[in-house]
Image (tube, rainbow, N blue to C red):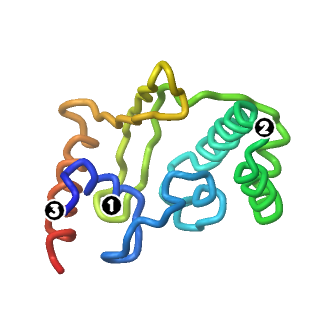
Amino acid sequence: MPDSGDQLAVVLAPQPKRQPVPDTAHEPKPVFLDEGMRSLYADWRGKAADVAAYLRLDVGRHPDDPRSAALLDELSTASPEFREARAEHRLKDKTHGRYVYRHPVVGELDLGFETLRLPDDPDQALIAHTVEEGTPSETALRLLANWAREELSVG
């Protein structure tokens, strides 16, 4: 059974009931290729632009990585929005920020994030999401945690 933080990660981005999180859960592909992700983010275009900028920076760090080249080809072929965002030539590192999610179970969640990187290996990162105390988002996150505990314990 995943711990409560893992449970929240699983249910934050909705997946089919009791299905494992796909291998691409933390890759750029779902943002551009999964229609459900478009409704998850209140500002999907902003999220998509950020992801394209993160990917551009990552590809710059690893220019000879064949997986990155294949990912760029796939996204460029399948997503006009990715092509538009990539054409802006933005670079961005995912250090901190916030996104507003529209979750189908608990509604709107305004979450901040901080990225913690290892100094000797910047490709290893822990992204911690936070919520302000006393806000409707905190209440929604608590409801989501309870719902996740119930959903993931069944079966």
Mark 2 vs 3, N-terminal side:
2
| Circle 2 or circle 3, nearest the eye | 2
Horizontal relation, residue 120 to residue 47: left or right = left
Q: Amino acid at mark 1?
A: Val
Disc 2 element: loop
Q: Amino acid at mark 3?
A: Arg
Crowd class of label 1 (few under 14; some 14 to 19; many from 20; radius 10 Å): many
What is the spatial separation of the Cα atoms under label 1 and label 3, in whole angstroms? 10 Å
**11 on left or right of 66:** left
Residue at image mark 1: 11
Whole-percent x, y for residue 130 in the image: 31, 34
Identify the image quadrant of the C terminus. bottom left
Tell me the residue at 47%/66% (across/down): 22
Question: Residue 147: image x %, image y %?
Answer: 19, 63
Nearer mark to the viewer, of 1 and 2: 2
Q: Which residue is mark 3?
A: 149
Quadrant of the rendering where the N terminus is positioned: bottom left
**Residue where numbered disc 2 is placed:** 63
Q: As shown in the figure, which amino acid type bears the numbered disc 2?
A: Pro
Q: CA distance from mark 2 to mark 3?
A: 42 Å
Q: Which mark is residue 130?
A: none
| Distance between mark 1 and mark 2 Cα atoms | 34 Å
Left/right placement of residue 107 relative to residue 118 reads left
Residue lying at the far top of the rendered structure: 119
**Quarter holding residue 38:** bottom right
